[in-house]
Image (spheres, helix red, strand yellow):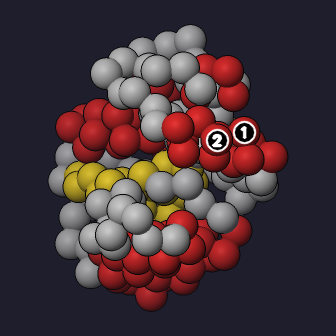
Amino acid sequence: MGGRTVIALNGPLNAGKSHVGRELSRRLPEARFIEGDDHGAPPDSPLAVRIGAAMTRLETQVLGMRCRWLIVAFPLREADMARLRRAAEQRGAAICCITLAPPLAVTLANRGARELTAWERMRLPRMYEEGFAQRAFSDLLLDNSEETVAATAERILVWLETFPSFSH
């Protein structure tokens, strides 16, 4: 394998970022998965505080990465992706953004064992309006609504073989 690469999994709530990220970390050598929602901010703190805590944690993880692949899962705004790109550049790592973009109706359904909260049901339509499922900074956009987590991970692995930092 070549140098270090950050894989930023973007998308709205309930798009499958965490499941796909964990699957990728199992299938890529020397990989580590970071769940962006594990940020340490109190769950009742304002959204902006939780996003800020998550981005600080993700940035710190990128700057200190020692693994070949660092896979992070978090809904990213333009400024968030720019922040991750700067951190990857400082670390000497490549970075790509993969956006998981199932239709809104799919993300509003209880997928697998996850049951959406009332707040998440209210937030999801706004996330689609705000463009979380169609970011211009995405290197790859996937509608993963009709496939398994393993199939989505496989599509990403095939795509990664074309990514400039990928080498055998």
Indicate whether 10 appears above or below 49. above
Front residue of this view, candidates 52 and 80: 52
Residue at the spot 33% in from the left edge and 54% down from the top edge: 35
Q: Residue 145, percent across and down?
A: 58, 18
The amino acid at mark 1 is Pro
Residue at the spot 21% in from the left edge and 72% down from the top edge: 66
Gap between marks 1 and 2, in whole Å?
Answer: 7 Å
Q: Is residue 138 left or right of residue 68?
A: right
Residue at the spot 66% in from the left edge and 75% down from the top edge: 79
Indicate whether 102 appears above or below 81. above
Front residue of this view, candidates 108 and 90: 108
**Could you tell me which secondary element the residue under label 2 belongs to?**
helix
Q: Is residue 33 left or right of residue 85?
A: left
Please identify the quarter of the rendering in which residue 72 is found.
bottom left
Q: Is residue 119 left or right of residue 138?
A: left
**Could you tell me which secondary element the residue under label 1 belongs to?**
helix
Q: Is residue 105 left or right of residue 22?
A: right
Q: Pointer 2: what residue? A: 122
Q: Residue 42, percent across and down?
A: 33, 69
Q: Residue 144, percent across and down?
A: 56, 23
The amino acid at mark 2 is Met
Mark 1 touches mark 2? (CB < 8 Å)? yes
Task: Let me know if residue 161 appears in the view.
Answer: no
Front residue of this view, candidates 100 and 91: 100
Residue density around tag 1, few if under 14, some if 14–19, many if 20 or more, within 10 Å: some
Q: Of all residues shown, which one is farthest toward the bottom?
A: 90
Observer-side mark, 1 or 2, equals: 2
Q: Pointer 1: what residue? A: 125
Indicate whether 111 appears above or below 79. above
